[in-house]
Amino acid sequence: MNDKTLLVGDVGGTNARFALARMVDGQPVLDHHDSFPAETYPTFLEGVAAFIDGCEVKPTGGVIAVAGPVTDGAIDLTNSPWQVSESELQTLGLKPVKLINDFEALAWGAPVVPADQLESLGGPVDGDPHSTVAVLGPGTGFGVAALVRDAHSKEMAMPSEGGHACFPPGDPVEDEILRILRRRYDRVSIERLICGPGLLNMHRALAEIDGRETHVDDPAEITKTALADPNSPCGATLARFCAILGAVAGDIALTTGARGGVYIAGGIVPRILPFIKASPFRQRFERKGRFKDYMSEIPTKVIMHKHAALLGAARVAFAESGQ
C-alpha cells in the first residue's frame, strides 16, 4: 500500500467532483468524495480550497480533470465561466499538481473500472488487450480521447477535441438535419447534436422536417418523454440521437484503431440504458461498408461508474508523483 494521499478532481461545465486518492495493491482507491454544482463557488480555486478544508488528511499533490483543452497548465472551461490554472492550485500547497482533459482521465480510468460497472452495447465481451481503447460520450458537451498501447503494453492517453469534428450525416433525414442546423451555425460539429443541448437542436430540426410545432425547450423533457413513450416524437428524437452516437462512435473507432474497445461515458447514456440497447446504436456503429467485419469485433460498453474520471486522474497523479 502507498501511504501518499493525493487530490483528484473532475470538473465539467455543470458539476465539480473531488476525492482523495490512495494506491492499494497497484489500484487507485478513492475516499472522501464530494460534489457540487460549479456555480456554488465564484471561482474554481475557492471550490478546491473548500474541499481541502473539509479533509482531515490533507493531500500533498494531485491531478484535476477538466472539460476542455489544457494549454500551458491552464484552461478556460469549455462550458463554464471558471478559469483554472496549475499555478493557482500550487498556492494551496499542492505540489506537484497537474490539469488534464476530462476525457483523457476517462481514458486512463476505463481499463480499471470493475466489470460490474460496465454495460455492454454489443460486440464481443473483450477486445484486443494490446490495442487502443477509445472513450467518448455526450454530457454538457461531447468528449473524445484514446488510450494507446504499444508492443510492450506501455500506455499513453491521447486527449482530443473530437467532439468538435464535423457532424457526418448518414441518411437523407440526417442530411436535412444538417441543412437546417447550417442556417443557425456556420459549421455543424458533432457536439451541436450529440450532447444535452444538441438533443434539443435535433428535436427542433426533426419537428421542422415533419412539419410539426414543438414547444419543448428542455433536453431532460425530451429524454423523460422518450423513455415513457418511445413511439412519441421525443422517442423518435432520442432514437435518432442514439443512432448518430453509434455512427460517430464507429468513426472514432476507425480513426483511432480502437480494437481494444469503445467506452461510452458522460451523463446521458447511463440514464437511457434500456432505450439505447434497443436502438440502432450498434447497427450504425458496425455500418462501415467494407469494414463491417472489423467493426463487429470491437466491444462497445457504457461506463456506469460515477467516478471513472477520478480513477483515471488518480492513475496519472501517482504516476506523476513517481509511484
Image (cartoon, rainbow, N blue to C red):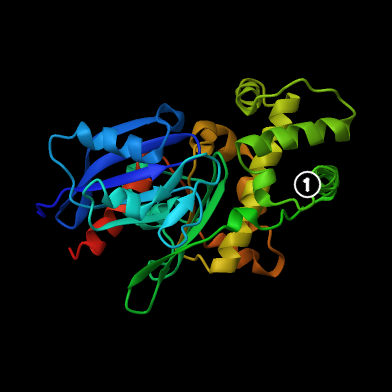
Secondary structure of residue under mark 1? loop
Foreground: 71 or 297? 71
Q: Looking at the picture, how far across and down is residue 271, in whole percent? A: 51, 31
Foreground: 170 or 52? 52
Does residue 6 lie above or below 14 as drawn? below
Q: Looking at the picture, how far across and down is residue 233, in whole percent? A: 75, 26
66 left or right, relative to 23: right
Q: Quadrant of residue 295?
A: bottom right
Q: Looking at the picture, how far across and down is residue 176, in whole percent? A: 85, 45
Count of numbered tags: 1
**Which quadrant of the rendered structure holds the N terminus?**
bottom left
Q: Which amino acid does label 1 sit on?
A: Tyr
Q: Looking at the picture, how far across and down is residue 55, in whole percent? A: 18, 35
Foreground: 116 or 69? 69
Residue 262 visible to the viewer:
yes
Name the residue tied to disc 1: 185
Residue 311 visible to the viewer:
no
